[in-house]
Image (spheres, grey):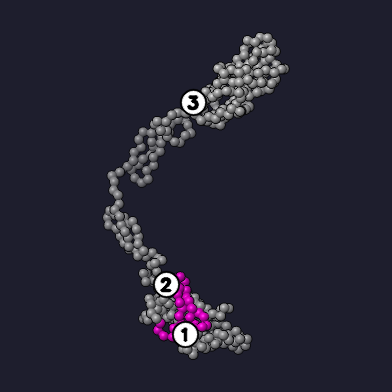
Amino acid sequence: MIGRAVAFLVLTIVLGAGMLWPGRAAAQPLGTFRWQTQPFCNVVAVAVTQVGGTYRIEGTDDQCGAATQASVIGMAFPNPNGSIGFGFTVVATPGGVPLAVEATVSLAGLSGTWRDSAGRTGPFVFTPGAGSGGPVRPTTAALGTSAIDTAQVQQRVAGTCPAGQAMRTVNQDGSVVCAPVGTGTLTGVTAGAGLTGGGSSGVVPLAVAFAGSGAATTAARSDHVHANVQFQVQGHGALAVPDTTLTTVNTWTSVLYNEGGGIYTPAAGTYTVPITGLYLITTSVFWNDFTTTLGFGTFIQRNGTDQLATTFGAAVAGQATNGRGQHVSTVFRLNQGDTVRVGVFQGSSASAALVPNQTAGNFAVTLLR
């Protein structure tokens, strides 16, 4: 055996040179060699035949001394790094499924490592004798407990649970841990007032029986409060009103109340409604004593452009009591996010103004429904 190993080494070293002569490509037997696929006890014994630049290997896997052996066939070849690579197939009989094995050995000692198509690996030890023992390498011919690594693969579930219990855990070896199951007397679900659905088996849905034409899909709490949107500013300061210019009233002086989530923006004189609904909008403003003949008016606007309500008056120069106060009100449906404001206008070919009024001047928005 030692002589054959030396011959194998020598032929490997001179392989490249041998390929230079055409006549050297004929098959040349090199002898029989043995390797153990540790940590398993399996020993492969193969006859090595040089065929050109590669080596044909044929032989058997002893299956650790079993009554039947497995066939081994493949090839060996020199690697660029000076090692020898092996690729062979092991077929266990009878009715075996092929197992692919690849190995690499060094020229110094002819030992190395191996790996098979099942993911197993280990030392590939040059073995002149019977090997060093170990378990039988699992084969792909029979996938029982002897053919799997239970540290990596879950064994088939073999445990059962008695009546009144259910599996809680499946162990690595297929045994199970059981736990009592709950019991109850529920036989059905009946939808009461205000609900729909119910049933006596399977998945039983329940839903709120909504009435009316609203778009809401949620039910209210029993202690809820309906939306109470109320806003009012009281009193306004002086405000110059240029001729023929619609002027926003933004001199409101104090917020009397703002309930329900609406947003008041003093600088713009606007109120933004928090929800869609029907609103009552009112305002009162007060003009100065008129020194010239003019027409004057007060507007309620939506979103800065839409005139929701308007009132007009006329004055003659010197008639100071000819209607300084103007009052406007309207009921209008507003959408969430709409803004409302008060505007004033005069056409005197001169200037006019609102005078400060901290008691009667106001602007109010109230949700009706």
Tag nearer the camera, 3 or 2: 3
Specify the label residue 369 is tagged with.
Answer: 3
Q: Is residue 146 above or below residue 1?
A: above
Residue 312 seen in this snapshot: no
Q: Sequence order check: which comes first, mark 3 or mark 2?
A: 2
Dot 1: element: strand
Query: Is 52 drawn above or below residue 367 in the view shown?
Result: below
Taking the view exactly as shown, the residue that stands out farthest to the right is 349
Front in this rendered view, residue 41 or 67: 41
Q: Quadrant of residue 210?
A: top left
Magenta-drawn stretch contains 12: no
Give coordinates of residue 103: x percent, y percent.
49, 77
Q: Residue at x 45, y 73 (%)?
A: 121
Above or below, 305 relative to 28: above
Going by the numbered disc 3, the residue's amino acid type is: Arg
Is there a contact, CB below 8 Å, between mark 3 and mark 1?
Answer: no
Residue at numbered disc 2: 140
Question: Mark 1 against mark 2, which lies toward the viewer?
Answer: 1
Which one is earlier in the sequence, the residue at label 1 or at label 2? Answer: 1
